[in-house]
Amino acid sequence: MAVPKRRTYKRKKRARNTHKVAPRIVIQDCPRCGSKKRPHRVCTACGYYAGEQRVAAAEA
């Protein structure tokens, strides 16, 4: 089994792993009610998705 000749330091390891970042969560305004929601999901405030009501609206 291969054994490294030199120690891998934190700076080198972190520089190699800089691209391994979790993507940011995208938040958009609902076109119907204006509340914040994730894209391609039913709005939790009004219950609409793609211009149709899919679920009952949440009571506030």
Image: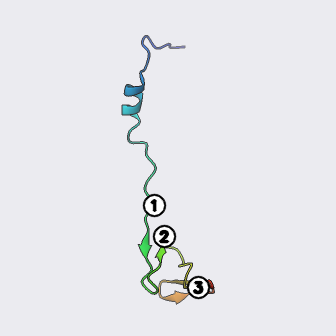
Q: Is residue 4 left or right of residue 16?
A: right
Residue 37, position in %: x, y?
49, 73
Would you say the residues marked 2 and 1 are in contact, meaning their CB atoms lie under 8 Å apart?
yes
| Nearest to viewer (mark 2 / mark 3) | 2
The C terminus appears in which quarter of the rendering?
bottom right
**Pointer 2 local density, CA inside 10 Å: few below 14, some 14–19, many at least 20:** some
Disc 3 to disc 1, C-alpha distance: 23 Å
First in sequence: mark 2 vs mark 1: 1
Is disc 2 placed on a helix, strand or loop?
loop
The quarter of the picture where the N terminus appears is top right
Of badges 3 and 1, the one in the foreground is: 1
Nearer to us in this view, 5 or 45: 45
Residue 30, image quadrant = bottom left
Mark 2 touching mark 3, by CB under 8 A? no
Q: Which residue is mark 2?
A: 38
Q: CA distance from mark 2 to mark 3?
A: 15 Å
- Residue 41 horizontal/vertical position (percent): 52, 74
Please tell me the numbered disc located at residue 54.
3
Position of residue 26 measured from the top left corner of the image (x, y, whole percent): 43, 64
Q: Secondary structure at mark 1?
A: loop
Relative depth, front residue between 46 and 5:
46
Q: Give the percent coordinates (x, y) of residue 20.
A: 43, 42
Q: Which residue is mark 1?
A: 25
Q: Dot 3: what SS?
A: loop
Q: Tell me: 58 left or right of 8.
A: right
